[in-house]
Image (cartoon, rainbow, N blue to C red):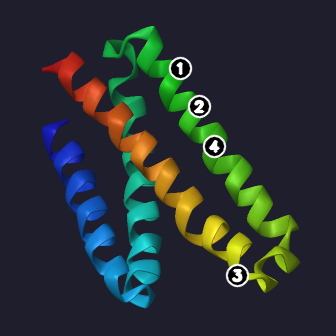
Amino acid sequence: MKILYKTNLLAFIITLVLYLTIYFGLLFQILLGLIQIFSALSLFYYWKNISKSSKAKVLYYWLFVAVYFLLCITIENLYNDTIPYIIGLILLPLSIASYFLYTLKRINKELS
C-alpha cells in the first residue's frame, strides 16, 4: 500500500512541476489519471480492510471521475473560451487527483 501511495504522490508532484511548461503538464496529467484509476481499482483488493469512511471517499472519487468524464464527452464546445478551458482541463482534474491522493494517504495510515 505504501508503494501505491508513493507512486501517486510522485506522479502528482511531477505533474505539478511539469505544469511550469503547461504543455508537458497536460500530457503528464493523462499519465497521472491512468495511474490513479489503476490505483483506485487496486483498492478493491484491500476493500475488506478499509474503514467505512474511507470506502465512502473512494466511492466519491469514482463519482467525481465519472461526472468529469461525462462532462468532457457532452460539453465539447465549452473549451472554446480560455477560463472554462483552464478549469476543465487543469483545475478540475488536479482537484480530483489531490482528493484521491488525500484519500489514499488516509487509507495508507489505516492499513499501516
Q: Nearer the viewer, mark 1 or mark 3?
A: 3
Q: Position of residue 30 (x, y in %)?
A: 47, 72
Question: Hey, which quadrant is residue 22 in on the image?
Answer: bottom left
**Left-right relation of 16 to 56:** left
How far apart are the alpha carbons under marks 1 and 4? 12 Å
Say which mark, if any, is on residue 56: 1
Question: Which badge, 1 or 4, comes first in the chain's sequence?
Answer: 1
Q: Are marks 3 and 2 in contact (CB under 8 Å)?
A: no
**Left-right relation of 8 to 85:** left
Question: Which badge, 4 or 3, comes first in the chain's sequence?
Answer: 4
**Left-right relation of 43 to 85:** left
How far apart are the alpha carbons under marks 4 and 3? 23 Å
Question: Which badge, 1 or 3, comes first in the chain's sequence?
Answer: 1
Label 3, residues with CA under 10 Å away: few <14, some 14-19, many ≥20: few
How far apart are the alpha carbons under marks 1 and 2? 6 Å
Image height of 56 relative to 94, above or below: above
Residue lying at 44% horizontally and 82% vertically, measured from the top left: 27
**Which residue type does callout 3 highlight?**
Thr
Label 4, residues with CA under 10 Å away: few <14, some 14-19, many ≥20: some
Residue lying at 80% horizontally and 68% vertically, measured from the top left: 73
Pick the residue in front: 27 or 34. 27
Circle 3 residue: 82
**Which residue type does callout 2 highlight?**
Tyr
Question: Which badge, 3 or 2, comes first in the chain's sequence?
Answer: 2
Q: Are marks 1 and 2 in contact (CB under 8 Å)?
A: yes
Residue lying at 20% horizontally and 60% vertically, measured from the top left: 10
Q: Position of residue 36 (x, y in %)?
A: 40, 53
Circle 4 residue: 64
**Which residue type does callout 4 highlight?**
Phe
Q: Residue furthest top?
A: 52
